[in-house]
Image (cartoon, grey):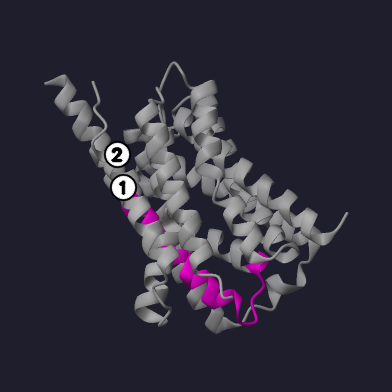
Amino acid sequence: MEGQSSRSTFLLGLLAASLGAIAYGTGQTLARYVVTGSTTPMAGAVYGIFFGTLVLSIVSARQIRHDLRASRAALGMMGMAGVCSGLGTLFMFLALSKAPITLATPIISLYPMVTLVLTHLLLKRFERVTPRMALACILVLSGVLLVILGRVEP
Amino acid sequence: MPETTWGIFFATLAALSWGTGAIFARRGMEHVGSGSGTLVSLIAGLVVTTIVALVFDSRPLVSVHPKDLVWLALFGVIQFPLGRLLNYTAIRLAGAAPATAILGSSPLISATWAIIFLGERLTLPIAVGITTVVAGLGLLLTERRA
């Protein structure tokens, strides 16, 4: 029974990840449309995060009071996650301004491998990376690289 | 150092930053709800990106066209509350490694939109890539959890 519940939670997580990938993919398409106009990528990133923060503040206002009672360490971890994501976005824009998209994008899309390796090294107590999971990640990543390279104009 | 080498350097830093961010999120989400966790991360990210934008070049921040602001608001809502909330929820429920692998397949979605709406061609590498991603997702979905 517990195993079934654990599997349902896992599958629900994968569903959330799939919907997240759809949201990110759609957002990236919109971002490309906006920054090809007069808006710079840097301004796009700042305003995008600003509007996102504003909307989420309104939507989750009630829950925030309760959640802010969580330990400072946990909130610090989430803060660090945000700093890393913000820096990731900035480094991505810098990379795209210096190197051709054909070179920068495949390197950037290697980030799930970084997570996989760090999970194995640092989160052993919380999460186990099985060989099957590692193979699945490598397959997804290889497929993404093929899609990126397949879209490059000759 | 040549420009391209800097580009490779920054691309590597981007991958390291995002990859590390998922690890912090995985630990933080054990004690914080998805909504508040996402909000804390967004505020931290907003502070960092605004500081960097102000330091390097603040002019584009004040010269954004009002029409673009509407698109940026739409982008912000889809990418951040929605995308990141689902991202962190997925990390909390499925774990950092499998969730990030699926989230990393977002270029596949933008390629699909480009084929449907922008008339891009479905080339052989894209078709093979899509098949490979689906095979990887199939492996993740059939992963047995005790």
Q: Which kind of residue does numbered mark 1 sit on?
A: Ala
The secondary element bearing badge 2 is classed as helix
Q: Position of residue A65 (x, y in %)?
A: 41, 38
Considering only vertical position in the picture, is B83 above or below A132?
Answer: below
Q: Residue at x 32, y 54 (%)?
A: A19
- Cα gap from disc 2 to disc 1, whole angstroms: 6 Å
The C terminus of chain B is located in which quarter? top left
The N terminus of chain B is located in which quarter? bottom right
Front residue of this view, candidates A54 and B82? B82
Q: Residue at x 40, y 22 (%)?
A: A128
Q: Residue at x 72, y 73 (%)?
A: B60
Q: Which kind of residue does numbered mark 2 sit on?
A: Leu
Please check whether the numbered discs 2 and 1 fall on a single chain. Answer: yes
Looking at this view, name the residue that lies furthest to the right.
Answer: B1
Looking at this view, name the residue that lies furthest to the left.
Answer: A1
Query: From this viewpoint, is residue A17 visible?
Result: yes
Query: From this viewpoint, is residue B82 visible?
Result: no
- Mark 2 touches mark 1? (CB < 8 Å): yes
Drawn side of residue B21 relative to residue B97, left or right: right
Q: Position of residue B51 (x, y in %)?
A: 73, 54
**Which range is magenta?**
A18-43
- Chain bearing mark 1: B
- Chain bearing mark 2: B
Considering only vertical position in the picture, is A21 above or below A62?
Answer: below
Considering only vertical position in the picture, is B9 above or below A27?
Answer: above
State the mark number for residue B135.
1
Mark 2, residue position: B139
Considering only vertical position in the picture, is A79 above or below A54?
Answer: above
Drawn side of residue A131 relative to residue A79, left or right: left
Q: Position of residue B73 (x, y in %)?
A: 48, 70
Looking at this view, name the residue that lies furthest to the front.
Answer: B124
Q: Position of residue A22 (x, y in %)?
A: 36, 59
